[in-house]
Image (tube, rainbow, N blue to C red):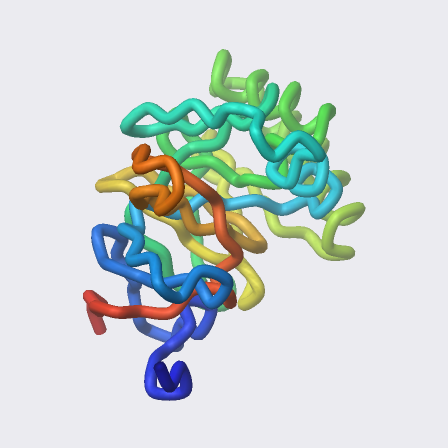
Amino acid sequence: MDYTKFDSIANISDGETVHASIYVQSLEMPSVEMFLSGFIGYNDEEDVLLSLYMPNLNAPIYITPHRIKVGETVFPIMRDIRKANESETVELNFKNRIGFLESDKDGIGYYRNFVDGRSSAVLTVSKLNKISQKKFGMDCFESKDNAILYHTMESNYILQWDDRIYVSCDFLCLCRYTNPVTGNLTYNLFEPDKLIFTSKMVQE
């Protein structure tokens, strides 16, 4: 098969939304047709190496309709993905998450502090700014009308499931397929540049 005729999932164009529920193929297993079930956002390469690419490749992956547990780490499963616009505004709340906060011990504490008490938003955003400066070298947060707002960068991805938003710096693709050896239904995570579309559903 001439793979140059197909698009890699990593090649998301500006203004394009890629939806799950499409068929894809892996460059590593070109004869196996897989169903793209969703997208998993991540931000810390070390977390990915420890949690997603485990030395024990037979370790179980637990799947629910909205979550995946790999090892001891739980990630939300999102259905749509697109590139963020520069300085797009996302409010942090019980639905919307900024992924790198979840991989930062202090960030998780500050985020929970905000969720548990909105009156602490002004104090909390100053702590979040310190984290954003450490991660990105710039302020990405502001406090406005007693809410914490995150301003995206062009390097961010917006992952979405209905009205829930997850902002990340990178992502993996969750696929299911019939294992050609065992005949069992199998879930696995793939890097987007290792997958190509065999059917395509995008929204301009």
Q: Residue at x 66, y 30 (%)?
A: 56
Can the viewer see residue 83? no
The quadrant in which the N terminus is found is bottom left
Q: Is residue 89 left or right of residue 155?
A: left
Quarter holding residue 17: bottom left
Which quadrant is home to the C terminus? bottom left
Residue 157 visible in this rendered orientation of the protein: yes
Q: Position of residue 6 (x, y in %)?
A: 34, 80
Vertically, is 27 above or below 89?
Answer: below
Q: Foreground: 45 or 102?
A: 45
Q: Left or right: 127 with respect to 112?
A: right
Q: Measuring 44% from the left and 60% from the top, which residue is drawn there?
A: 29
Residue 22 appears left or right of 169: left
Q: Is residue 23 left or right of residue 78?
A: left
Residue 22: give x, y in percent of width and height.
23, 57
Q: Quadrant of residue 186?
A: top left
Looking at the image, residue 196 lies above or below residue 106: below
Of residue 197 and residue 129, the one placed in the foreground of this image is 197
Q: Residue at x 75, y 41 (%)?
A: 46
Q: Whole-percent x and y of residue 149?
A: 49, 43
> Which residue ends up furthest to the front in the rendered image?
181
Residue at the image position 70 percent from the left and 41 percent from the top = 49
27, above or below 125, in the image: below
Counting every numbered tag in the picture gives: 0
In the rendering, at what x and y percent does residue 5 appear?
34, 87
